[in-house]
Image: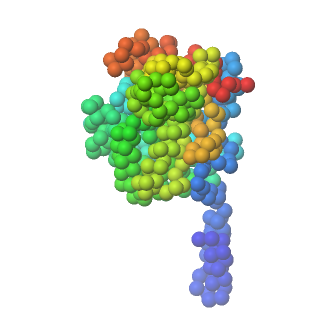
Amino acid sequence: LTAGSADALVGLSRDRARIPMGLAALLAAGFALCALPLAAEAARVANPYAGVKWYVNPKWRAHVLAEPGGAAIAGNSTAVWLDRIGVIEPGTDAKGRKTWGLADYLDDALAQKAGLITIVLYDLPNRDCAALASSGELLIGKDGYRRYTQDYIDPIVKILSRPQYRALRIAAIIEPDSLPNLVTNLAVPKCREAAGPGGYVQGVQYTLNALYPLRNVYSYVDIGHSGWLGWDNNLSKAVTLIADTIKGTAHGVDSVAGFVSNTANYTPLAEPFLDKYEHSAVPNDSGLQVRQASFYGWNPHFGEIDYVRAFRQKMIAQGFPNRIGMLIDTSRNGWGGPQRPQAVSAATTPDAFVNQSRSDRRTGRGMWCNQPGGIGERPRADPVPGVGAYVWVKPPGESDGVAKSGAPDPSDPAKRFDRFCDPTYAPPAANGALTGALAGAPNAGQWFSAGFHVLLENAWPPLK
């Protein structure tokens, strides 16, 4: 009821004596108070990242400012990761230091007068099913789905629902790598289980249903990256799986604001010397395609901009509205520095032509752990047509996984050593190539000073 309704109620008591005057006045005062909420509800917008100030996480900022040269990026917005039940509320870490909960970050966003904060929901049962570095605390076979919904999602939604946050736009990145794993990794038992009851599809649907009533929350579903799902067959399967998952929610295609690619990954936005050859033969060669190079393996999408535009159009063809937005994580995909190519190669074979022309210097596009990338494009809204924002979902400087086998993370013992984080390891499918991971990295999510400086040195565009 509004204050006007309360006034009408007082008038009704005067004119018709249906309600005692004292009670009517008391009700009027209560209704008037209810008509003055702690924060006015924000109008729903097409792009929540546009036209507002973005939140800067002071915890990340403190790490960055403690590093030489870090001030150049310390003012940028990064996402807040909720990667286990224990971080939803304030607590203490393994060293006895006080930690923030979700409400602390939201309150700080209000104190900064920020208009938008990005959070990452990342705790599905059987999480990170095809790897080990970010293995989660919940397992499907051990009551994981119930705990995910009741102990993780429900408390988060309860906090986000508080009236004081209604004017704050909250972008929620939904479960990185989860649905993409169901496209390519069903041979892995843990992923195969995640494709069934109580797994990724059901968990994502529950999350989208729970967040939908909060009109200031904008959900973005993760779609992997071009080096993972860019092949025609993978892309077709991913579009079908992700579209069907979202359509299976209570509000269907309206449950999401859009999609996010390259989360915590290193794929560049574009390859300036190669993109025009995505469907062409190597110059001066006998007809071999550039995408035949071992690095691409016939994948026609060399960069993220091309990939997200293709994904978006396919989703619109699936019945999604034209307003859906695409986000790209550019936190570590700059690939600048002295090794960045300055001109297109004159080589005449696919491998030599690509290897001498590409900015992405990974030993393979499937290498994902602590790569020597670089700070990428700075976060901003509407950077290029078809992309709603460049965002820093993965805070630069936080490790992807521990480089050596040893003691688990005392704050999050579910995270384990993965050989893809070992710089001495040559994965079987890599034709003898090493992972390219940086040595000395700590457990996933912990601060990695040496890795941070590599990112600074290789920033593209260069840092001032």
In front of the other: 58 or 392: 392
Residue 435 rendering spot, x and y as whole percentages: 43, 17
- Image position of 458 with respect to 213: above or below: above
Quadrant where the N terminus sits is: bottom right
Residue at 46% over, 35% down: 279
In front of the other: 267 or 355: 355
Left or right: 120 with respect to 141? right
Residue 371 rendering spot, x and y as whole percentages: 50, 20
Quadrant where the C terminus sits is: top right
Residue at 48% over, 20% down: 348
Left or right: 290 with respect to 33? left
Residue at 54% over, 19% down: 346
Is residue 368 shown to the viewer in this render?
A: no
In front of the other: 35 or 212: 212
Residue 427 rendering spot, x and y as whole percentages: 36, 17
Residue at 45% over, 41% down: 222
Q: Residue furthest bottom?
A: 16
Q: Residue furthest right?
A: 464
The colour scheme used here is rainbow
Q: Which image quadrant is residue 363 in?
A: top left
Is residue 207 shown to the viewer in this render?
A: yes
